[in-house]
Image (cartoon, helix red, strand yellow):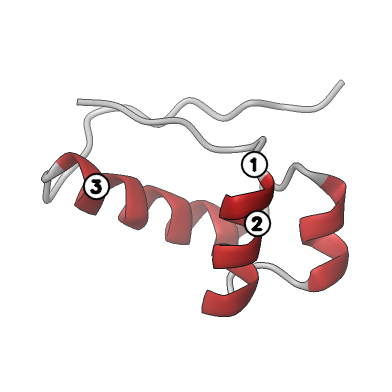
Amino acid sequence: MCTKAGYFTAATSTNAVNAGALTEDQAAAGHSLAPEYVRWQTRRNGEQLGRERLDLVPLHIRV
């Protein structure tokens, strides 16, 4: 099972700020590869998928 991290929706950014994974400034950017955010997003997606472990996490980079 895999998930992705990098770009996010407004709803996800709000949840990440509330969880302390992103600052308001980071959330406004709509993209983050900050370690705290990637860990939070990966954990959250694993829970949503009902998995304790994910096999792959592609990172969407901003060019």
Q: Image quadrant for the C terminus?
A: top right
- Residue 3, picture quadrant: top left
Query: Of helix, strand and loop, which one carries label 1?
Result: loop
- Residue 18, picture quadrant: bottom right
Residue 30 placed where, x, y %? 78, 44
What residue did someone put label 1 on?
Answer: 9
- Under mark 2, the amino acid is Ser
Pick the front one: 22 or 14: 14
- Under mark 1, the amino acid is Thr
Residue 45 placed where, x, y %? 33, 45
In primary-sequence order, the first of circles 3 and 1 is 1
- Under mark 3, the amino acid is Gln
Residue 60 numbered tag:
none
| Residue drawn at x 63%, y 40% as measured from the top left | 8
Q: Residue furthest front?
A: 11
Residue 48 placed where, x, y %? 24, 47
Query: Of helix, strand and loop, which one carries label 3?
Result: helix
What residue did someone put label 2 on?
Answer: 13
Residue 36 placed where, x, y %? 56, 65
Query: Of helix, strand and loop, which one carries label 2?
Result: helix
Q: Image quadrant for the N terminus?
A: top left
What residue did someone put label 3 on?
Answer: 48
Q: How crowded is the residue under tag 1: few (<14 C-alpha within 10 Å), some, or many (20+)?
A: few
Pick the front one: 51 or 28: 28
Disc 2 and disc 1 in contact, CB within 8 angstroms: yes
